[in-house]
Amino acid sequence: EGKRSGIAALKDEKDFFILGHPEYSKKTLDLEYKRDLNQGLEITPPSHYYDEANNPLFIWRSSASVLFSNWLNFAVYQDTPFILH
């Protein structure tokens, strides 16, 4: 079974852990997969990553952007005291 992506949080919801790599570019996983194949590792292709022509898809970009924006808002902006003059 392949690795799974997701998010886990502690009870206080201040600490959370991202499983997977939403920061990856379109080709990053492809390069890592081909590297491991060339090293003779017995691995399976990444799930839902290639189209029918074996080209990498880039379906997680918008989700990664939303995740980062929400984290930035929650972890930084909500706890930063702004003083308006």
Image (cartoon, grey):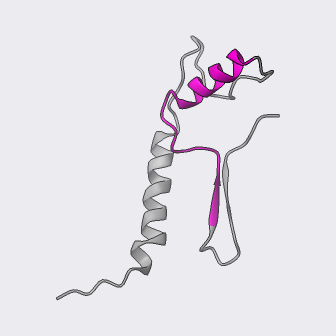
Q: Tell me how many marks there are.
A: 0
Residue at the farthest left position: 85
**Is 35 covered by the magenta stretch?**
yes
First to last magenta residue range = 16-39
Quadrant housing the C terminus: bottom left
Most foreground residue, 59 or 25: 25
Q: Quadrant of residue 21?
A: top right
Residue at the farthest front position: 39
Quadrant housing the N terminus: top right
How far from the left and from the top, in percent, is residue 81? 35, 85
Q: Is residue 16 above or below residue 60?
A: below
Residue at the spot x=74%, y=39% of the render?
Answer: 3
Residue at the spot x=59%, y=74% of the render?
Answer: 14
Most foreground residue, 67 or 35: 35
How far from the left and from the top, in percent, is residue 41? 78, 21
Residue at the spot x=46%, y=56% of the render?
Answer: 68
Q: Horizontal placement of 34 versus 64: left or right?
A: right
Residue at the farthest top position: 53
**Is 38 covered by the magenta stretch?**
yes
How far from the left and from the top, in percent, is residue 40? 76, 17
Q: Is residue 48 above or below residue 68?
A: above
Q: Is residue 30 above or below residue 14?
A: above
Q: Is residue 54 above or below residue 20?
A: above
Q: Quadrant of residue 18?
A: bottom right
Residue at the spot x=61%, y=27% of the render?
Answer: 32
Q: Horizontal placement of 36 versus 21: left or right?
A: right
